[in-house]
Image (spheres, helix red, strand yellow):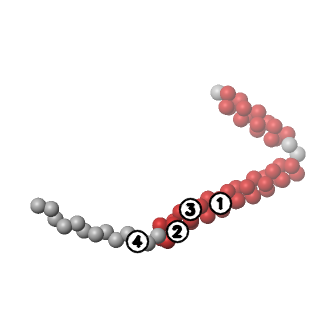
Amino acid sequence: MASTAQASLVVQLVQLLPSPLLRVLDGWSHRVARRRARARQQQWLQSQAAPAAEAPVKYHLKPWRD
């Protein structure tokens, strides 16, 4: 219940901001989101490329044991 009260307070505060400031904040948040998405994508690409760079491990069958 406290989180709802805090959220509504934040909404009220944001609604009081002038529209030019809201546009600036919106642009900033989009840039941050794009930067973070690009970083996540780079991290994912590196994790996918890492196993391919290593030499393939050959599996050697062991002889049957009696």
Residue furthest toward the top? 1
Task: Check disc 3 and give the amino acid type.
Answer: Trp
Query: For residue 49, which numbered disc appears in the image?
Result: 2
On the image, the x and y values in percent for residue 35 come to 70, 59
Q: Secondary structure at mark 3?
A: helix
Query: For residue 39, which numbered disc appears in the image?
Result: 1
Mark closer to the chain start, 1 or 3: 1
Q: Residue at x 61, y 59 (%)?
A: 40
Task: Check disc 4 and give the amino acid type.
Answer: Pro
Q: Residue at x 61, y 64 (%)?
A: 42
Q: Residue at x 49, y 71 (%)?
A: 53
Query: For residue 56, which numbered disc appears in the image?
Result: 4
Mark closer to the chain start, 4 or 2: 2
Q: Nearer the viewer, residue 22 or 35?
A: 35
- Mark 1–mark 4 CB contact (< 8 Å): no
Real-space Cα distance between discs 1 and 4? 28 Å
| Mark 3 residue crowding within 10 angstroms, few (<14) / some (14–19) / many (20+) | few
Which mark is nearer the camera, 2 or 3?
2
Q: Nearer the viewer, residue 46 or 5?
A: 46
Task: Check disc 2 and give the amino acid type.
Answer: Ala
Q: In the picture provided, is 50 more to the left or to the right than 31? A: left
- Quadrant where the C terminus sits is bottom left
